[in-house]
Each structure stands twice: as C-alpha cells, then as structure tokens.
C-alpha cells in the first residue's frame, strides 16, 4: 500500500503536465509532417507515373508489365498512407486545439428582453 502511495505521489506531477507535453509533441509532429507532405507526395506521384510509363511502354513483355503494375500499386499505396497520416495529424490537432491558427474570440451578445408595459 505504501509503495502505491509513493509511486502515485511521484507520478502525479508528471501526469498533470502530460497534456502540455502531448500538445507540444503533436505540434512538433505536425510541423514535420507539413514539411514532408509536399516532398513525399511529389515522389509518390512520380513513382506512380514511372510505373505507368513502364507498364505502357513495355506492353509486349509480360514481366516488365507486371513490374510496372507493381510500381503503380506501391505509388498508390504511398499516396494513401500519406493522406491517412496527414488526416490523423489534422484530427489530433483539432482535437487538442493546436491548429496553429488565430485564437478564437468569444463574442458576448447582450440579452434583449422586451420591456414590460404597465
């Protein structure tokens, strides 16, 4: 029992600041992903079109066609993984409130009540 209390007393401050660490971590990952997205997406599209060209230009050779088809499939798979990771990071940003945009402003609208006529 005493060990559990000592461990919880040691870990509680770390758990209290965990939200700030997670938000910082997600923001850092977001910056890295946003830097890599254009590069990786360009490579995936080029890879796909390379496989397409190989597939079309070697229409007579069945082995080269299969190789081109495999390259196209890997290019499509790379684009899918890229978009999926991008979406997950965007979802985490919106969930944790680290979109990097301007702060939201709450506009207070005064209540208007009709005056009472006597």
Image (tube, rainbow, N blue to C red):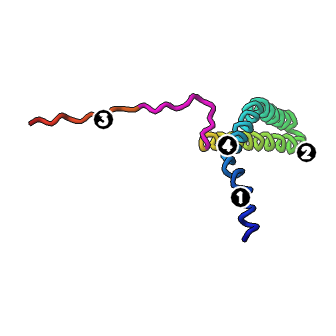
Residue 84 visible? The answer is: no
Residue highlighted by disc 4: 20
Give residue 38's position: percent from left, percent from top. 75, 29
Residue 41's quadrant in the figure?
top right
- 9 within the magenta span: no
- Mark 4 element type: helix
Report which residue position mark 2 lands on: 63
Which residue occupies the foreground of this view, 77 or 8?
8
N-terminal label among 3 and 2 = 2
Q: How dense is the environment of label 3, judged by Cα within 10 Å: few (below 14), some, or many (20 and up)?
A: few
Question: The magenta stretch spans which residues?
Answer: 96-107
First in residue order: circle 4 vs circle 1? 1
Q: Residue at x 57, y 28 (%)?
A: 102
Q: In front: mark 3 or mark 2?
A: 3
x, y (%) of residue 1? 72, 71
> Which element type, helix, strand or loop, lies under badge 1?
helix
Q: Secondary structure at mark 3?
A: loop
Q: CA distance from mark 1 to mark 2?
A: 65 Å
Q: Which mark is residue 9?
A: 1
Residue 21 image position (x, y, % from top left): 71, 43
Pointer 4 or 2: first along the chain: 4
Query: Residue, x 66% and y 46% (percent of image)?
Result: 19
Marks 4 and 2, how far apart in space?
A: 54 Å
Q: Going from the N terminus, do you reach mark 1 or mark 2 first?
A: 1
The number of numbered discs placed on residues in the rendered structure image is 4
Mark found first going from the N terminus, 3 or 1: 1
Binning the other alpha carbons within 10 Å of mark 4 as few (below 14), some (14 to 19) or many (20 upward) gives: few
Q: Quadrant of residue 2?
A: bottom right
Residue at 64%, 43% in the rendered image: 92
3D distance between C-alphas at marks 3 and 4: 36 Å
């Amino acid at each position: 029992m005493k060990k559990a209390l000592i461990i919880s007393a040691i870990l509680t401050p770390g758990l209290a600041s965990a939200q700030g660490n997670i938000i910082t971590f997600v923001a850092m990952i977001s910056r890295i992903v946003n830097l890599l997205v254009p590069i990786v997406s360009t490579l995936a599209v080029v890879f796909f079109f390379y496989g397409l060209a190989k597939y079309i230009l070697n229409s007579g050779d069945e082995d080269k066609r299969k190789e081109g088809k495999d390259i196209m499939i890997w290019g499509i798979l790379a684009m899918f993984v890229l978009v999926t990771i991008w979406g997950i990071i965007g979802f985490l940003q919106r969930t944790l409130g680290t979109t990097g945009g301007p702060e939201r402003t709450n506009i207070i609208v005064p209540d208007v009540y009709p005056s009472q006529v006597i």
